[in-house]
Structure formats: C-alpha cells, structure tokens
Image (spheres, coloured by chain):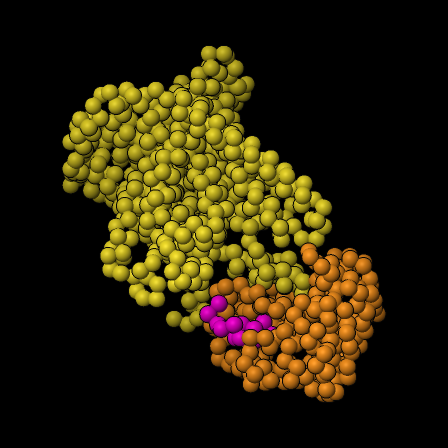
Chain colours: A orange, B yellow
Amino acid sequence: MTGPVGFTLRDVRLVGTARARLAGVSLDIAPGERVALIGPSGAGKSSLLAVLGAAERPVSGQVLIDAGDGPRDPWRLPAGALRRLRARTWRSVQAPALPPRQRVVTALACGLLPTSGSLATLAMLVRTPQRVAIEARLTTLGLGGRGEERVDRLSGGERQRVALGAALLSRSGALLLDEPLAALDPARASGVLDSVLDTVRHDGRTLVCALHQHALIDARFDRVITLEAGRVRTVLTAGAPIPIEAIVA
Amino acid sequence: MTPAWRRAAPVLTVTLLLLCGLLQILPETPRWPAASAWRAAGAWLAGLWPPATDAAFLQRVLGATLATLAMATLGTLGAHLIGVPLALLGNARVSVSAVGRPMAWWARAARVALRAAMLLLRSVPELVWALLLVRLVGLGPLAGTLAIALGGAGLVAKVHAEALESVPRAPIDAALANGAGRWQVLVSEAVPRCRDELLSYSVYRWECALRTSAVLGLVGAGGLGQELDLSLRFGANDEVMVLLTLLIALVWLADAVGNGLRAPAAAHPGKAGAGAGTSAGAGAWRARVIRTVSSVLVVALVIGSVASYGSFEAFLLHDPLDALARFAADFLPPDVPAERWPSLWRAARETLAMSFVGIVLASLLALPLALLARAGPRRTTMASSTVLRGVPELIWALLLVIVLGLGPLTGCAAIAIHNTGVLVRLFVASLDAFDDPAGAALRANGASRSGTFLFATLPGVLPRLLAHVLYRWEHAIRVAAVLGVVGAGGLGQSLHVSLGLFRLQEAAGTILAMMVLVAGVDLVSFAVRRYRVD
C-alpha cells in the first residue's frame, strides 16, 4: 500500500504541563500536498507534527488520517492497525535521537524498519539492506562515502542530515519534518531542502515541514501555514510574500 | 581489517575464549553425573522437608541472622568510609590543573598511585581476607566485618570514581573554567548527576555484603554461614532448609529496602507518559513513605549492629600490633616450592575459565529473562531471579557438588546460576532507567517492538549492559578464586590445602597468584569498558 497520505484535523487541542500546546487547530492537508509550517518557537509546530504522525493523542478534537483507504481516526484503531498507519507517515524529531556507536548506513536503514517484517529485521542485523539506495542518498545529502562512520562522531548538522536520510529512505506516504535544516549552514540548507522537495515530488509523497528559514520557502511549497500560540494564524499560498507579522508575534 | 570483520571481531573473540574455557573445564569432569548421583541428590533434597523448628535451633538462628545483618551493614559502612575518600581524591574529571591543558605530572602520578591502591585493595577476595583475619582477630563476626570492609572498599572506590568520571564533561569543564573549585564542582555538578546511580550502588553493595557475610561463616567468621556449614556437615537438611530460606529472605529484604531508597529516582516524571497526571501525587507520597521507612530501617540496623558487638575490645586488649607482627612473620615472604608451580598454573587457568564461562552463560540466560520480565510476567521473573541470586555462589557450589562432583564444572555452574539472577535484576534496572528517545521516535513511526529494540534500544543501552557483565566478571573471578574452599576447583583449592597444612608462605604465594589474576581481569575489563564506551 503506497501513495500519498492526507490529513484532516478538526478543533484539535493538546495540553502541556504549563499551557495549551495546541488550542483548537482545524486543518486539511491533501494527499501529495507540500506544506511549510512556520511560526515562532513554542507556537506548536512540533506538537502539530506529533498529532499528524499519530504520535500524540489530542485531549479533544478529531484527527483523520487517509493512508489510501479512506480517512480513519488513528486513536480508534486496534494496536496493529495503528502501527501500520504510523508506518505510512514518517515524523523526524527536532534533535535527531540516534543510538551512539550506530553506523551511518544502519541509521539510514532504520527508515525501513516500520515496513520490514520480522525476518527482514533480523537480517538487518547481519547485512544492511538497500546499500545502493543508501549510498546514493548519502551522496545527495553531502555525506557520500561516510556510511561506515559512527553517528556519535558526526557534527550536529551531519547527524541531522543522517536523520533526514532515514526519513527520505522510509517507504512512507508522508514526511513530517521538524526543522530539518536547523543545524545546517545556509548554503547546505538550500541544497538539502532541494533534495527533500525533489524526492517527495518524484515519489508523490505528502510533505509537512516546520521551518525557520523563511527565505528558502518558495513556489515549490503549495501552502505556508503560520502558527502562533497553538493556533493557525494564517494560511498562505506559497510564492506570496510572507508578512513579517505572521512570523514575529 | 575490513569494517565487517571489525564488527564481527568481538563476537568471534568471545566465542573462541568460551571454547577455550570449556576445554579447560570439561576434561576435569570425567563423566556426566551418573544415576547414583541423581539419586543421592534426590535423597538430599527430600531431607530438606519438613524444616527444623526446635526452639534451641531457632534461637541460635536468630542470633546468627542478627550477626549476619550486623556484619553486612557495618562492613558496607566501613567499605564506604575507606572507599569514597579514595574515589573523590582519585577523580580526574574535576581536576583543576587539567582545565585547558594536559594534567600536571604530579597530579597524574598521584592519581595512578591512588588507582593502584584501589586495585590492590580489591584484588584480594573477601573470603581470603576472612581466612586471614580469622587468624588475626579470632573466630567470629569481627573478622567477617573487617573482611567485608576491606574487600568492599576497593570496589566502592572504583565504582564511585568511574561514576563520577562518566558524568558529562561539558558542564563540569564549564564550571571549572569559570573558576569553580574541585569540591564545589563535585558537590554541585558531579555528585547530583550520579547520585541515584551511586545510592543504588551502595544499596547493591549492602546486598552483596549480606550474601558475602552469609558465606564468610564457612571459614569461621560467624553468622548464618557458620550455622549453614555446621548443618551441612552434620547432614541436618531440615536446618539447611531454614537457613537457606532465611538467606533468600534477607536478600529479598535488602532488595525491597534498596528499591525503597531508589524510589525517588523511579518516581521522576517523564517516564510514566500519558495518564500519569492524577496518580503522580499519590505515587510521590508513596515513594516518600517507602523512603522514610527504609531510611529508618537502615539507621536502626546500624545502631543495632553496633550494639551486637563485643569482640572488638577483646582484640584491642590483646596487643593488636604484636599480633599483626607475628601474623606477618608467618606469611611473609610468599614462597611456592618449584615442584608446585605447574599445579598452581593449572589452578589459575581453571579459575579464569570458571569465571569466564560462568559469566558468559549467565549473560546469555539473563538477557532473554530480563526482556521477559519487561514484556509480561514481571513479578514471577523477578521473584525467581531473587531466588537464584539469594543463594551465594559458594552455597550453590556446596549444593551442586552433590550432583556434579568435585571440580571446576561445579564452580562454573554455581557462578552461572547465581549471576543469572544478579544480571536479570541489573539488566531490568538498566532497561527501565534507559531514556530511549531513539526508540520512542522509531516506535512513533510505526516500527515493530523487536525492530525498535534491536536498532534503537539495544545499541543505546548495550554499553550499560556490557558494563554490568564486566563488573560481574570482575566479581566472578574473585569468587572463582575461592570456590575451591568447598572443593570446586581452582586456586581456592590450593589455598585451602596449604592453609590446612600450615604451609603459610605457600598460601601467601597462592594469594599472590589470585591477586595477579584478579587484577588482570580488572584491567582487561577496564580496557574493554573504556574502548566500548568511548
């Protein structure tokens, strides 16, 4: 089962320890759409991505995820079906959590885990699958030939690109990326974003990408959604200039 | 070496060493247990029931239990009094002279000297300390207490030093570079960061001391062990039953008290996840109650233990310095006659093989059991692991000798069984305490349980599991060195024979061999840990 994933949120609320993290978000993201998510820190970008990836359950409101077999509420599914649904979206967290001592190629291959059976998983212990695809991916991310290095010996920006590589390698229908360019220098950030956008367009995947680099958002994104204090503030068509007040609260 | 070979090398090395160890052990056991051995074991087991209940015996047992508790508690206290200062002094991470430049040569030399002192202290097994101290201060719990204090001090020092050095470097370097002093940094940065770990280790040390104090009696150092030795000798299995049950109960008690003391760490927010909001208050309150009760219990134990002593004055009255001088003259210099060198060499190889094979087997058994405990029947699994580790290796060896006969196979099996119990508990604690962001991320992306474990949790937690295994190996080599006292092969048997024949200088030579072996294993373990953790 492949193909892009669509999302529908209705009045979704998520409560944190001190304040509301999402205070009533309603949103439709069509399958195959490329959405940029912007807003000041603490506006709820990561929380929104967590809800879209069915990683966190909202306290109220409705989440519907359409993974090709009609919109379904992930929180009403049995455990096995929820897991398969989660495998259809890949969410990368802000600070990539990679086990120390893991090799770069293994870290990338972990993108295949959600869609691998038990035997394939065990086989991964002995032999990294899809070596050719992984090497190609590493090259496009500027990490060519560094597959055997340990992830804890890489710089912050390199680790971030490794995590992104796992996301792109995954056989998911939607990528939910949380500031994938945060630790990259401007020149590198632009190249990496190109590679992400090329890949999702080529594979026909949905992309929701939280960003702080507004200068990089261009017409390759379909929409730009700005968040503020847990609410959607504006929804803009990409290519249009982003008003400064949409970013600075 | 290609990368693939480099990754396979550790597994191949361990397999090879395991084979060598088995080749060392198995030929020493000429036949697999015959039917008569099983029958004898059956008869022995049948004698365990019904347990002894006569009043005189129970009264004696009560006294022995108190003596065991006292030995363990005071011994652990003594080990900390000696060990913690050593660890604080020998700590490199808070070295002021090392900020922004290589450490000064004198500081480096002082550290090496302290490390050597720690290594020397801990390379003599507790039972050997006890064997020697019994000759010095006489039979009874004082010898046991001192043995536990001296044997434990080196371990306490080492673990504290390593925990303090594993604290993240950045905040400490920042504080030092900003002009903070050594003790300020220790108190404000280093200790809080590993407080739970150290507290948990101290409790664990006490648990170990409890087990040790139970076996020290086998060489005459008082407590439950002495009673057990007597009952085993007289074949009074109904009494053995009571004593073994008590021993397991004591270890269980130590575990429960330890969990209470560790509760604040477990009650930390973040692990519980969704739905913990309402129960968090009640949990914290419960943790506080448990902690208070446990603390009171520990203080009461210390006071009670001090009160139950009498032999100390007796020792002091009899001119201790003179006794020490005579003692030293008997044993020094160490001297092993040339014709006994080959047998000493064989015993050393046997000892090493017993410890290594025993620990590898224990690790292989403990990992699946720990996963089982976390996946489902936690209570049952943990309870059975308590029984396994509640009986010390020496007692397991005493029991296994009936089936497996005299020789290193018995010692190896005893080490494997006991350490499986210990490792299950350590593995479960590590897995519980392991904050696993990589695993959480993979799970949220729909990876399976096994996939997440193999590619995120296991690689993350493996250094800690490996550290536990290596620590247990360091412990096991000490045990393997003395298991021969009950006929389970290795250096202990040589020592037992020489002491029995009053060849004291030869005994000193055997002890020297033990120290070399133990220190060697410690160094290998240290090297492996350092290589793997960095």
Q: Position of residue A148 (x, y in %)?
A: 48, 73
* Residue pictured at 70% horizontal, 67% vertical: A44
Corner quadrant of residue B319: top left
Q: Is residue A197 left or right of residue B61?
A: right
Can residue A115 be seen from the camera position used here?
A: no
Q: Is residue B125 highlighted in magenta?
A: no
Corner quadrant of residue B412: top left
Q: Is residue A159 highlighted in magenta?
A: yes
Q: As displayed, is residue B231 above or below residue B480?
A: above
* Residue pictured at 56% horizontal, 69% vertical: A107
Q: Is residue A232 left or right of residue B474?
A: right
Residue range of the region highlighted in magenta in the rendering: A152-164
* Residue pictured at 26% horizontal, 35% vertical: B494
* Residue pictured at 57% horizontal, 61% vertical: B456
Q: Position of residue B286 (x, y in %)?
A: 63, 38
For the C terminus of chain A, the quadrant is bottom right
